[in-house]
Amino acid sequence: MTLLQVQPHTGRTHQIRRHLAYCLGWPIVGDAKYDKGHSAAKILRTNGMYLCCHSLEFPYPLNDNDLLPARVAASCGCGDNGTIKLRVFPDSSRQQGGLRLRAEIPLPPKFMERLKEHEL
């Protein structure tokens, strides 16, 4: 078992699942559609598919002075000790500058349990 961080380029349906299963031969744990029915994969399906969006990042449409992340965090009951981390930072990929917003959540408990089992 391997923990991967992947960044899809197009957002096409099943892009991550298909590429891992067909191109690399490494289906996602618990993926009944692409695991080709291997016996080990069938056993792990009982916990669902092990695919999770840990973070999401996109251009931030407002300026430095707007406190939208703080308001969003407050409205969803999150803060320094909450589960959602919001961060605004400079966008180095754009010539005109600008900002990006990144939202992060911890991995689900089933991921953490499996990682501990396999010492990853």
Image (spheres, rainbow, N blue to C red):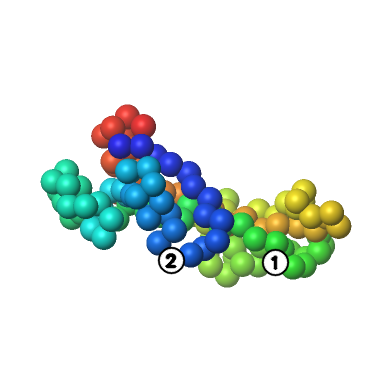
- The residue located at (40%, 61%) in the rendering is 14
103 sits left or right of 70 in the view: left
> Residue 79: where, in percent of width, then height?
57, 56
Q: Nearer the viewer, mark 2 or mark 1?
A: 2
Horizontal and vertical percent position of residue 35: 25, 51
Tag 2 secondary structure: loop
Front-most of residues 30 and 19: 19
Left or right for 57, reference 105:
right
Circle 2 crowding by C-alpha within 10 Å: few under 14, some 14–19, many from 20: few
Q: Residue at x 43, y 41 (%)?
A: 4
Q: Give amino acid for label 2.
A: Thr
Camera-side residue of 95 and 10: 10
Q: Residue furthest front?
A: 23
Q: Are marks 2 and 1 in contact (CB under 8 Å)?
A: no
Residue 20 x %, y %: 38, 48
Question: Which element carries disc 1, helix, strand or loop?
Answer: helix
- What separation in Å lies between label 2 and label 1 (alpha carbons)? 31 Å
Q: Position of residue 42 (x, y in %)?
A: 16, 51
Quarter occupied by the C terminus: top left
The answer to whether residue 108 is visible is no
Task: Name the residue located 26 percent from the left edge and 60 percent from the top edge.
Answer: 33
Residue position for label 2: 13
Say which quarter of the image contains residue 46: bottom left
- Nearer-N-terminus badge (2/1): 2
**Label number found at residue 103:** none
Q: Vertical placement of 46 versus 23: above or below?
A: below
Q: Which residue is mark 1?
A: 68
**Quadrant the N terminus occupies:** top left
Q: Residues within 10 Å of mark 1 (few under 14, many from 20)?
A: some
Tag count in the figure?
2
Query: Can the viewer see residue 41 in this picture?
Result: yes
